[in-house]
Image: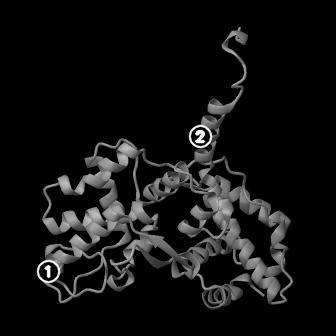
Amino acid sequence: MKLSKHLRPFLEYLEIEKGRSSLTIRNYEFYLQRFLNWADDPSVDDVDQESVRKYRLYLNRLEDPQRGTLKKNTQNYHLIALRSFLKYLARQDVNAYAPEKIELAKQGAREPEFLEATDVEQLLEAPTQSKAPEILKARDRAILELLFSTGMRVSELANLKRDDINLTRDEFSVRGKGDKVRVVFLSHQARFWLKKYLDLREDESPFMFVRHDRANKDSDEAKPITSRSIERLVKYYAAAAGIPKKVSPHTLRHTFATDLLMNGADLRSVQSMLGHASITTTQVYTHVTNRQLKDVHQAFHAKRRSEGDEE
C-alpha cells in the first residue's frame, strides 16, 4: 500500500488521540508531504535505511532562494515527523521501517537571546513615550508587560479572552502547547496596565487584546490582534527603544526565564512556568547557571590561600 494512504488517518490520530494543535498538525502534514513528494509516494516497504539516508542528504542540501539551506533544527523537524508517522504505523500493525533507527542531525548548543535589565526597562517604557493614542499606548504597554511577567508564547497571548484574567488575583491559567494548562503570574505593573487598557475599552469583544484601527471601528465587534501583529509591535518598540539586537516575543519569553534563574529560581520551577513538557527543553538556559557558577567560584574558591602564594 502507498504511504500516502496512511497520511490522513495519521493526522486525524494526532488530532483526536494525541490532542495536537491545528498548527502542529499542519506542520506535520507539510513535513510528511515533502517526504512523499521526494520519494514519489513510496509503498510502506520502500522506506528503508537507504531511502532514509538519501532523504537526510536531500534535506541537508535543500536550499531556499531566500533563506538558504535548511537549519539543522528544521531538518530534525522533518525527521521527527517521519519517526512519528512510522511509530503510528507500527501501532496499526503495519510492518514499517523501525522509527528508532532514524537518528536526528547533531546540533550545536544554542544559547537563547535575552535582554539585559536596562534594555527591558527601555522596551517596556517605549509605548508610553510614543505619540500614539492613549488606548494604543495602554494596549501595547500591557502586551509587553504581560509577555515579560508571564513568559507566555505569542499565540497564547493573542488568544487570551477577557474572562481568562481575573485582575483581583495575581495568577491565571493558560492553555498552551499540547492543550496543556499551566498557571502564570501577573506582576503589579502588568496588572496595572491591563486594568488601564480595559478601562479605556468601549467595545464588547471578548478578546483581551483587539485592533484599534479605522476599519475596526466600522465593525460591530472589535477584531482580536494577531500573533503576527504582536511580533511586529515588539520589533517596532525595540527599535524605538534603541535596542540593537533582534527582539521578538520569544526574546521576552527567554528574558523571563533568564530573569527567574538569575534571581535564584530552580530549573524545575521555571520549567513549570514556561510550560515545557521536558526539563531538557528548559536546560537551554544553563548559560545562566553557568554564570552563577563563575560567581560562586570567584567568591569561595581558594580563600585560604594568601596573596603571597601568587607568583
Q: Residues within 10 Å of mark 1 (few under 14, many from 20)?
A: few
Which picture quadrant has residue 101? Answer: bottom right
**Disc 2 target residue:** 291
**Which numbered marker is on residue 3?**
none
- Quadrant where the image shows the N terminus: bottom right
The mark that comes first in sequence, 2 or 1, is 1
Disc 2/disc 1 C-alpha distance (Å): 50 Å
What residue type is disc 2 on? Answer: Arg
Q: Residues within 10 Å of mark 2 (few under 14, many from 20)?
A: few
- In depth, the one of 50 and 196 nearer the eye is 196
**Left or right of residue 110: residue 99:** right
| Tag 2 secondary structure | helix
**Left or right of residue 124: residue 92:** right
| Tag 1 secondary structure | helix
Query: Which mark's residue is nearer the viewer, 2 or 1?
Result: 2
**Which numbered marker is on residue 217?**
1
Q: Is residue 42 visible?
A: no
- Quadrant where the image shows the C terminus: top right
Q: Position of residue 42 (x, y in %)?
A: 75, 77
For image coordinates 36% across by 41% down, the residue present is 244
163 relative to 273, above or below: below
Q: Is residue 272 visible?
A: yes
- In depth, the one of 108 and 57 nearer the eye is 108
- In depth, the one of 203 and 53 nearer the eye is 203
**Left or right of residue 62: residue 194:** left
What residue type is disc 1 on? Answer: Lys
